[in-house]
Amino acid sequence: MNHVPHIIQDLTLILGVAAITTLLFRFLKQPLVLGYLMAGILVGPHFDLFPTVSELKGIQTWAEIGVLFLLFGLGLEFSFRKLFKVGKTAIITALFGIAFTFFFGYLFGTFLGWKPMDALFMGGILSIASTTIIIRAFDESGEKNQLFASVVMGVLVVEDLVAVVLMVILSTISVSRNFEGSEMMFSIFKLIFFLILWVITGVFFLPGLFRRLKRFLSDETLLIVSLALCFLMVILATKAGFSSALGAFIMGSLLAETNSGHRIEHLIQPLKDLFGAIFFVSVGMLIDPAMIAEHLWVIVGASLILIIGKPLFITTGALVSGQTLKVSMRSGMSLSQIGEFSFIIASLGLTLNVTSDFLYPVAVAVSAFTTFTTPYMIRFSKPFYGIVDRGMPSSWRSALEKYSLSLQRVPETSAWKRYLRAYVKNIVIYSVIILAFFLLSVRFLFPKFHYDSFSAILFCSIVLLAASPFLWALAFKRTDKTAYSELWLKPSQRGLLVVMQLFRLLLMLFFMGFFFNLVFTPLVALMVIVVSIFVLFLLRFRIRDFYSRIEQRFISNWSGQENRSKEPDQNLAPWDTHMAVVQIGPNLPFLGKSLEEIRLREEFGINIAMIERGNVNLYIPTRHEKIFPGDQLHIIGTDEQLEKFRNFLNEFEIATGPWANLEKNIQLRHFTLTPNSSLVGKSIRASGLRERTSGIIVGIVRNEVRILNPSSDVVFEEGDELWLVGDDKRIKVLIRENEGG
């Protein structure tokens, strides 16, 4: 072949220049993303020193594939299970940051006289922080094991999902060119509907599929299967009216729930890096230095919103959620940049032809500048907190501590709250499944049948039989039996419970009527409903048993027994403490010694919540338990305490990862010692609390002063507020004994 295609020449140019710039930026200890952007500027049409890419459309296609791989990779890191575990702190903090940053971004654009669409997209661009940049910054700074880092990662999980929703909203507004609330609500409803449907379907089928194919899945085959599923979801998302990027993100999140999730993430990394590099280079090619110079003050203003405004918003959100000032400020100053999602939002505006040409280069310039400042913001967050803390009036500091302490208490969830939560979840999930069955069958299956009465009846029978387990679950499945029993014992509550049950039954009848009305006339539909109810009643026990098997499979897949992370629940750590994992090596001096002999609490101020030994997990180990090589210690402590212990184990690495739940009976509880409590006047060691509760004391509040991981010699006093991690049932017995004196 004598002729080299232009696309090969362009790729050679792009990758060659990118290699040089990234090596330079690696040497300068700067993020590689900046190197890719610089490479794009150099090979772009606005810079004459280097040859220019000739096939812009071809490179753009590769860049679009790069977006898919980026979103697929982010989905693999996201996992819907993580979203359910991030807790109120991450949700409140993220929503605070996104809402206020979006508002000020929109206000900034309006102030400059931009058209509404430019201002809206500017708000969206500035709202979403960069997961990639922050993770790299944490790795390089060694801060990834700090408490604030876990808060930041939770916020990023929420921001990723909100970014997806934001893309849908902006697309809807862009297409309609107006702000009709009904159309926007419909788009959001459609997004929620398909998200729930895809998650349920994916969790039900994919883990089982990968388990059955496990022995046939070599690295090569697994990569092919994963990419095929990714592009399939891209097509489905596009057909449903969403962006292709959303489809890639969703499939990545679903595959993250399988036992092959980590393996897929590892296999996809080289492709993600390659196509991601091409994407970021293509982004850099759109940067016009002349346009940046023209809009320099816009770039400066937008950067100030991120560097000053967003840390303030995030800090406020974290404080409102109950975090300490230190954690809140360090979290806020870590999220002061934009990245990959912002580029995608900016490119969305260009693709839909609703934003001005200058907005994309401005977004890229702001991203480049804030990416450069991110490591310094993280590094400076600690001394800046010290300055603020020293200058703060003592009354303010005391008020913040009291507020944080009050929100970190673990309240008893009322029976009504538990029941309503399960009730709403039941209705939403099964309504989505039933609607999907009916709408998809009418759309795709019904045209395959002849339009005569017999065929219509046969079609409805097949669909109704397939949907019957979920119709039964919607109407009759008991939701949170424990809470329901507690409420039923109160005669005053029974009437409302009956009404709520009748509502579920009527909802089932409504869905059946809706479906039959799509096929038959209203009168015939009514007759078919009556017959169907009679048939379903006769088959109710078979339907119930079949549903139980479906539910059991879903629960098994969702809990991810094969893929369950063994790290402990972050919620077992109060106040400024958090969890970390320590891998025990073969050369430590305390190997073979008991926890009582090692005295980790006395020496380092830390507690051990769990010892992971092979396939055995020892929860809340006793003081007689010994430490052996290969053990993984799940420890509770403050940033400083964990750092001290890590320095002691300087040849070992503390690895903190995504949190997972401990056994259900292991909980964090607190109570206040009454004057007549038998514990008053006894030390922690003499009280026998470890033996009585299978737990440990992780904190004491005494005269509004917090004592974290107190020494076993500490003597209990009247009015002490004890925080214990241990067997929930045993702790509740202890609390009742304390209240009864």
Image (cartoon, rainbow, N blue to C red):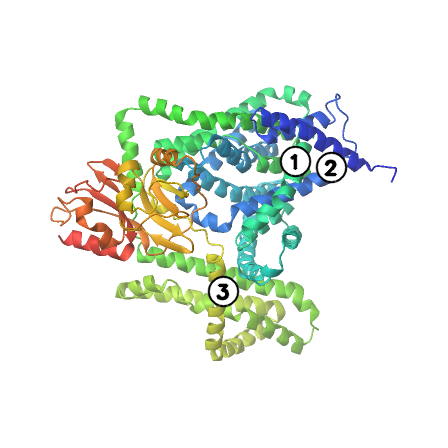
Query: Residue 518 occupies which quadrant of the picture?
Result: bottom right
Q: Amino acid at mark 1?
A: Ala
Q: Mark 3 Cα within 10 Å, few/some/many (few <14, many 20+)?
A: some
Relative to 561, is 369 on the left or the right? right
Q: Residue at x 21, y 50 (%)?
A: 689
Question: Which residue is at the far left?
Answer: 676
Q: CA distance from mark 2 to mark 1?
A: 12 Å
Q: Secondary structure at mark 1?
A: helix
| Among the two numbered marks 3 and 2 on one chain, the one whose residue lies closer to the N terminus | 2
Please, which residue is most extreme toward the right here?
2
Q: Are marks 1 and 3 in contact (CB under 8 Å)?
A: no
Q: Quadrant of residue 422?
A: bottom left
As drawn, the label of residue 595 is: none
Residue ID for mark 1: 277
Name the residue beneath numbered marker 2. Answer: 59
Q: Is residue 651 left or right of residue 626?
A: right
**Number of residues whose C-alpha sits closer than 10 Å to that of mark 1, classed few (under 14), some (14–19) or many (20 or more):** many
Q: Secondary structure at mark 3?
A: helix
Return the residue nearer the eye: 366 or 618.
Answer: 618
Q: Can you name the residue that lies furthest to the bottom here?
A: 538
* Front-most of residues 518 and 341: 341
Disc with the residue nearer the chain's start (2 vs 1): 2
Question: To which residue does mark 3 refer?
Answer: 553
The image position of residue 133, as x and y in percent, is 54, 34
In x, y percent, where is residue 393? 28, 24
In the image, 113 versus 668, the foreground residue is 668
